[in-house]
C-alpha cells in the first residue's frame, strides 16, 4: 500500500521552496518592477504613493549630497540587468527618476 502522506508532503515542500525563491521578485513585496510600472512614477508623488504602486524598494539610501532619500528597484523583463531609481526631495516628494543598465552586473566577482 502506498503512503498517501509522502506525495502531499513533497508537494508542500516544493511549494514552499518555489514561493521563497519568487517572493523577492514580486513587485507587491518590493524589489522588482516592470518598465511600465516604473513609468507610472511622476514628480511630486509622495513615498506612500510610490510604495502603493511599486512595493518597498530594494535599496533605500540617503547620501550626504542629496536632498532626500534614493530608492532603487530592479527592472524585470529586460535583456540586460536594469535598475530603476527614484530620487526624493527634502520635502519627501519625487524629484526625479531614471532607468539604466546596472553597471556592476557583468563585473567579475
Image (cartoon, rainbow, N blue to C red):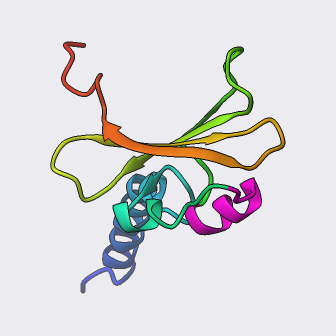
Residue 82 rendering spot, x and y as whole percentages: 30, 42
Residue 42 rendering spot, x and y as whole percentages: 58, 60
From the viewer's side, name the closer residue of 3 and 99: 99
- Depicted 14 relative to depicted 102: above or below: below
> In which image quadrant can residue 17 be found?
bottom left
> In which image quadrant can residue 46 be found?
bottom right
Residue 26 rendering spot, x and y as whole percentages: 46, 62
The residue located at (28%, 24%) in the rendering is 103
Reply yes or no: does residue 47 show up in magenta: yes
From the viewer's side, name the closer residue of 37 and 66: 66
User: Bounds of the magenta span?
Assistant: 44-54
The residue located at (65%, 60%) in the rendering is 50
Chief secondary structure of the magenta portion: helix
Reply yes or no: does residue 22 show up in magenta: no
Quadrant into which the N terminus falls: bottom left
Residue 84 rendering spot, x and y as whole percentages: 43, 45
From the viewer's side, name the closer residue of 17 and 35: 35
Query: Is 63 left, or right, of 102 in this rendering?
Result: right
The residue located at (25%, 13%) in the rendering is 109
The residue located at (62%, 52%) in the rendering is 56
Amino acid at each position: 500500500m502506498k503512503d498517501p502522506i509522502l506525495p502531499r508532503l513533497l508537494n508542500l515542500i516544493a511549494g514552499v521552496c518555489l514561493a521563497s525563491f519568487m517572493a523577492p521578485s514580486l513587485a507587491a513585496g518590493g524589489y522588482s518592477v516592470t518598465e511600465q510600472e516604473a513609468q507610472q512614477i511622476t514628480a511630486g508623488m509622495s513615498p506612500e504613493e510610490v510604495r502603493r504602486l511599486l512595493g518597498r524598494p530594494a535599496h533605500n539610501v540617503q547620501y550626504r549630497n542629496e536632498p532626500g532619500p534614493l530608492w532603487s528597484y530592479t527592472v524585470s523583463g529586460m535583456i540586460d540587468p536594469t535598475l530603476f531609481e527614484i530620487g526624493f526631495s527634502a520635502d519627501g516628494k519625487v524629484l526625479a527618476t531614471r532607468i539604466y543598465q546596472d553597471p556592476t552586473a557583468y563585473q567579475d566577482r
